[in-house]
Amino acid sequence: MAEFHEFADPAELADFAADKVASDLGRGLSERGAASLVVPGGRTPAAVLGKLGKKPLDWANITVTLCDERWVPEQSPHSNAGMVRSTLLAAADAKFVPLYNFATSPEEAVADIEQRLESLPRPWDAVVLGMGDDGHFASLFPGESALAVGLDLGAQRICVAATGPVEGPRRLSLTLSCLAETRHLYLLATGRNKRAVWEAAASADPRVLPIAALHALAKVSLQFLWCP
């Protein structure tokens, strides 16, 4: 069952999320000497990461990676890695593991990226996700073939190549089985439409609203952070 938090505006949501994730990372550092974080792209997450990077943590022992990436170089304005570098990493000297590797396509990159991520310690200390108006999270979009593996908790795969919106670049996404292997999971959303989509997803088919798969998670507690 997800824990619902409502905020007055995006700034209040970002403050709360940054504080919660900083606490999760601090606990990981205290208990294990290292911590790990998975983050998304997007405007709302960017505000959170900007605030998080200013937290007084031992960033040298924190590893950060992405839940998904558009298949574009970091110099592109559409790159999630580029956004992380200009927000979180502009203030925090964390270890960053990007998902883009200059392969011609994400399909060609899957094996290399899985090997790269396999070496990172899991469970993650925190995973932060965003969601779309169509009910996608990470780059697991409604109706596409990537969902067969991407939403399969038993697949034991780390990432999958995804098509994404027709007008945009190809993508690479972490799978639900990988994302769910976390101590803390946060879903960020703004706008009344996204709240309605989240509520509808409680009884929806994940192939239609992939976010429904998060409703069904039993092994990890999800905190849904929302503002109008």
Image: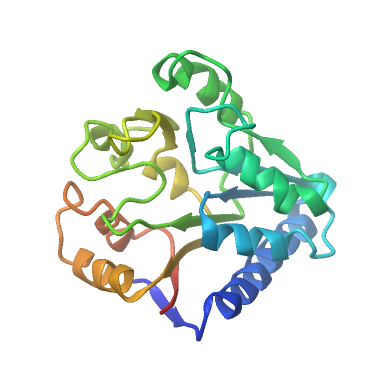
Identify the residue shown where x is 37% and y is 71%: 2
Q: Does the image show residue 209? A: yes
Colouring method of the image = rainbow
Viewer-closest of 92 and 193: 193
Q: Nearer the viewer, residue 97 or 44?
A: 44
Q: Residue at x 47, y 13 (%)?
A: 104
Q: Give residue 91's quadrant in the image.
A: bottom right
Q: Quadrant of the N terminus?
A: bottom left
Going by the image, does 39 lie left or right of 216?
right
Residue 213 percent location from the top left of the image: 28, 54
Q: Quadrant of the C terminus?
A: bottom left
Q: Above or below — where is 166 with respect to 50?
A: above
Q: Horizontal and vertical percent for residue 109?
A: 48, 18
> Is residue 155 placed above or below 9 in the rendered structure?
above
Looking at the picture, how far across and down is residue 25, in whole percent? Answer: 70, 59
Q: Is 183 placed above or below 174 here?
A: below
